[in-house]
Image (spheres, grey):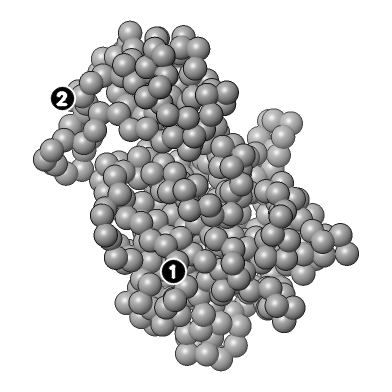
Amino acid sequence: MDPIVQRSLDTFGFAQVIAVMRQDAGAAASFGSLEPAVTDLFLPAPPNAAAAFSVAPRRPPPPAIRQFPRLGLVVGYVDPEGASALEAHSQVEDVQPAEPLSLIRPVASASAAYTPRVTWGIRSIGADKLWAKGLTGKGVRVGHLDTGVDAGHPALKGRVTGFAEFDLFGERVANAKAYDSDEHGTHTAGTIVGGKIRGMAIGVAPEADLFSGLVIEGGHVLLRVLAGMEWCLEENVRVLSMSLGIRGFTPFAVAITQRLRQQGILPVFAIGNEGPNTSRSPGNYPEALSVGAMDARKRVAAFSSSIVFNRPEEPNQPNLVAPGVGITSARAGGGGLRLNGTSMATPHVAGLAALLWQAKPDASVDEIEAALLGACDPLKKDDVSRFGRGLVNGPRAVAQLLGS
């Protein structure tokens, strides 16, 4: 039994868990058809004590069990008997605690000054050189799970193809109009697909199709994020940009990240803003493409997380770095905003992945990731433990992908 699950069972008499279904059951299988039904092993309603963890009262109460067919997950509460039965079930691959996720907040914020040119971040990864070759991300779907997006911002008008808001319990809000509950989402979205702010080009893949899910503010964030991932799978996105996680290494989402990849999504996740010898899950998994932040001097930002794991597969995290200091992008409500953080670096890589997929639409997730990692320049003034492969180079990544 997972020690976190066991501790909750010992302390409260119940635990909220994620049951990961075996792959042979099929990520798109109907869980209602399982015999004996896995859902019968969960408690029929959230325990009364669990109400203390809820952000807001709700009538009617939230469902006790949530199923995510494409991810192959069931989330709910179990007592000790149910937890043991789940672990022993022939169709359950693993039982993990439902861990809390949080936004990776920027470390600095300022109003942005505009100049009629391309941002330094776009230039540093060579995305503008790819635009000159007709690669703008056109036709590539990019998922964006964040605080939402201001789709009415002049730099984002016509660029938000899909929007979904998920409520405090991870249920989709009917007929929700695109908006940003904070300012983080509009900024990261602008770096992926934004046009121009007073002449300044801010988006790496300005003609990609953005599918933005509001999953972070308030409520049980894990259920909201899982629902957002499920939605991204429904919408057949190719890249998922996500700047949130759990501090430290916790394996609860390894299977989830693997299943995103298996179903054609490249998970591009921020590594965190807590500095050296730190990281966040799921960004620190080998299955994710983890992104750290660098500045315009080609130095790793002091806040950018990095760690070396004692494991054979991808011991150095992050995998690579991208521009994350002094990044100008769209501000919710209009105008521009300059932010620092690995959250700002991550959408640069997500946008670049969209350009690569436009160049080779039939490429696999592994091929796109290999091209990005194989086209990095080491940062000569920093230790390799801080930057992984280095600064990603867009034109070289495309050349490697196309074998030219």
Q: Give 315 or 225, whichever is nearer the viewer.
A: 225
At 38% from the left and 66% from the top, the residue drawn is 149
Please give the count of numbered marks on the rendered protein: 2
Viewer-nearest residue: 5 or 62 = 62
Amino acid beneath label 2: Asn
Report the residue marked by disc 2: 48
- Can residue 173 be seen here? yes
Where residue 195 appears, x then y in whole percent? 51, 80
Q: Position of residue 35 (x, y in %)?
A: 41, 14
Q: Secondary structure at mark 2?
A: helix
Task: Indicate left or right for 92 with 23 as reference.
Answer: left
Residue type for callout 1:
Val
Question: Mark 2 and mark 1: span between their CA atoms?
Answer: 40 Å
Count neighbours of disc 1 (C-alpha within 10 A) and say few if under 14, some if 14 to 19, many if 20 or more.
Answer: many
Residue at the spot x=69%, y=59% of the render? 361
Q: Which residue is mark 1?
A: 160
Name the element at disc 1. strand
- Locate residue 215, reporting x and y percent: 36, 51
* Residue 393 at least partly seen: no
Q: Are marks 2 and 1 in contact (CB under 8 Å)?
A: no
360 and 226: which is toward the camera: 360
